[in-house]
Image: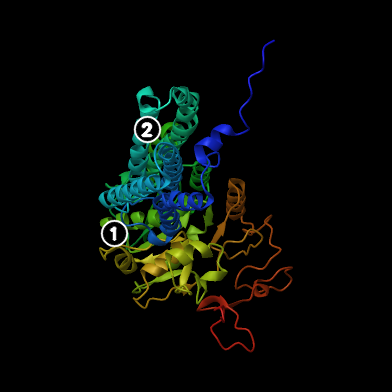
Amino acid sequence: MKTKKAKPPRFYFWRKTLSLSDLNIPRRSKRAIDALRTLSLIPSFLGFLYNNRQALYVPVRDAGGAIIIQSSQVDYIVASFWCALAGYWNWILTTSMMRRWIFHYEISNAIVRLITFIIITWCISAYVSSKNGPDQPIRTWMINCSMLLVTAIIRLTIVSDPKYHRKPVIVTEPNLFLKLTIKKVLIYPMSVATCLSVFAVLFQIDRLQYTASQLMVGPVSLNAILPTPTAGTSILILILSSWSHNSFERRDMMRKTGLKLLHDDNLNISVDYRFVIGNPPSAQAQLFTKPTLIREVAQYQDIIMVQSSDLEKDKSRKVYEALKWARSIDQHDYIVKTDDDIFVRWDVILKETSQLDSPSYYWKGLTYRNIPVHILSNAKSINIDYGLPVLPAYTHGMLYLFSRDILHLIVAPNSPRRFITSDGENVAIWLFGFNIHPIHDKRIQDADDVCENDMIGKRMKTTMDMSRIYLNLVSGRPQCNGFKSTACAMCYSCSGKKFGWRSLNLACDEKKGVTLSEMAGFPQIAGIRPW
């Protein structure tokens, strides 16, 4: 009768690989050995902490827009994974080496060899880190892991060689674990780390190619040539758009509706407009959207592509590149910036602008003053990119107008600039220090449920809304006919309205603009944290 072969204990492989518990070692010596084995994890542990700290520090390092390309958060996260792999291999290597030394030598001699091995690994890790520098985290720990991998392979080669064993019965024991060790300890973790690194590299390549504005250089392309203005006053309109399908529909609707209001032969004014887009945001957009965009450019001749990312978070950088292009032309008296989802009463703006007597440093829009950063919806990013508690007086980014001398102040200084998401606030930051204050115009409104018949700028939720308000104008009806107006618009009277802007703790001055209401009993600046 055949006897069944006894099964090894549960988790026998991992107990033998990660622990020395199955060896008959005195308790005092085992504690010392465990403490020394733990010291082998120090380089990996310090590297893991450093990479995680640097990953959290990246937004602060690149506050206001990175000037140069450095290691990203993805780099440090992947490097942390390689640190964990290095610590895992280091622990297994010291365990296996100590297991062999205890079998062949006295405990004291084995401990001396363990200390020597740990010091060597420390020195190698320090040398590799110093040679690669702090901005090469992945390469540093890939080299450390490669050296540990070579050491582990050499160890396995020696263990599997019969001439290195004293007793014949031991010869077969390493072969029982050789295959499992190679697969579970070396191949599987290495494969996971390598795949993660490959995906990270592909992601970084795509990001650098399509979203890193620092690497985008060259002139403005597409329809960048403008005719020379012939009238007395000239205006350049910059309409921010994008590569998305929704933006394509909005551009098409603007040409059929709002932009038709630009033609007024009774005014001695010359107008040019351009839709502004950035570089394609992804390979998919470049592949599928580019043919449609090329046909649109050929048909309408009213789009420019600036050297900037087309993502929403890089909107201010795209505006700045468009302003640099406008400065290079330098043939318009006024610049108007708006978005492709804004319906603008161009007839009113042109009439009012033609009546201006060439004022110096003219800047007009829906103005906000003394607004603390912490109450804004994008307070987290502004706190990092801007850094001060209160924003300077700024105009809402949906629509604002400024004169040529303001354009020179924004663009002319050849120095690095800070970029935040909202271009309206960013223009104020660029002009901070010149003692220039915007002129408040309450007729520019962003809310969905407000509409006043004298408004000159309103954000449209759909292209049909844009068509409806245009049809109201050409038909002689009030422009807000059919639009929801349950709430009162900012700085307008709230009589008969269900919801008022004063309930938001806001105050409005007809000349200075929107501010926070100062609460009774609080002498500090309205909106500033008292702690």
- Decide: is 460 above or below 499: above
Relative placement, left or right, of 389 versus 208 is: right
Question: Of callouts 1 and 2, which one flags the residue occurring earlier in the amino acid sequence?
Answer: 2
* Among the 4 quarters of the image, the one containing residue 98: top left
- Residue 397 percent across, percent down from the top left: 48, 62
> For this rendering, which residue is in front, 436 or 114?
114
The residue beneath circle 2 is 155
Toward the viewer: 135 or 27?
Answer: 27
As rendered, which of 83 and 181 lies closer to the eye? 181
* Relative image position of residue 255 (x, y in whole percent): 48, 46
Count of marks overlaid on the render? 2
Task: Determine crowd level at label 1: few under 14, some 14-19, many 20+ residues with C-alpha closer than 10 A.
Answer: some
Residue type, numbered disc 2: Arg
Residue 399: x and y in percent read 48, 61
Q: Quadrant of the C terminus?
A: bottom right
Q: How is the image coloured?
A: rainbow
Asked whether 250 or 520 is in front, the reply is: 520
The answer to whether residue 494 is above or below residue 47 is: below
Residue 342 is labelled as none
Work out whether 390 lies above or below 37.
Answer: below
Q: Is residue 355 visible?
A: no
Q: Is residue 12 above or below residue 29?
A: above
Mark 2: secondary structure = helix
The answer to which quarter of the image holds residue 182 is top left
Q: CA distance from mark 1 to mark 2?
A: 67 Å
Callout 1 secondary element: helix
Q: Amino acid at mark 1?
A: Arg
For this view, does 138 lie left or right of residue 84?
left
Disc assigned to residue 327:
1
Regarding residue 444, the answer to whether it shows in the image is yes
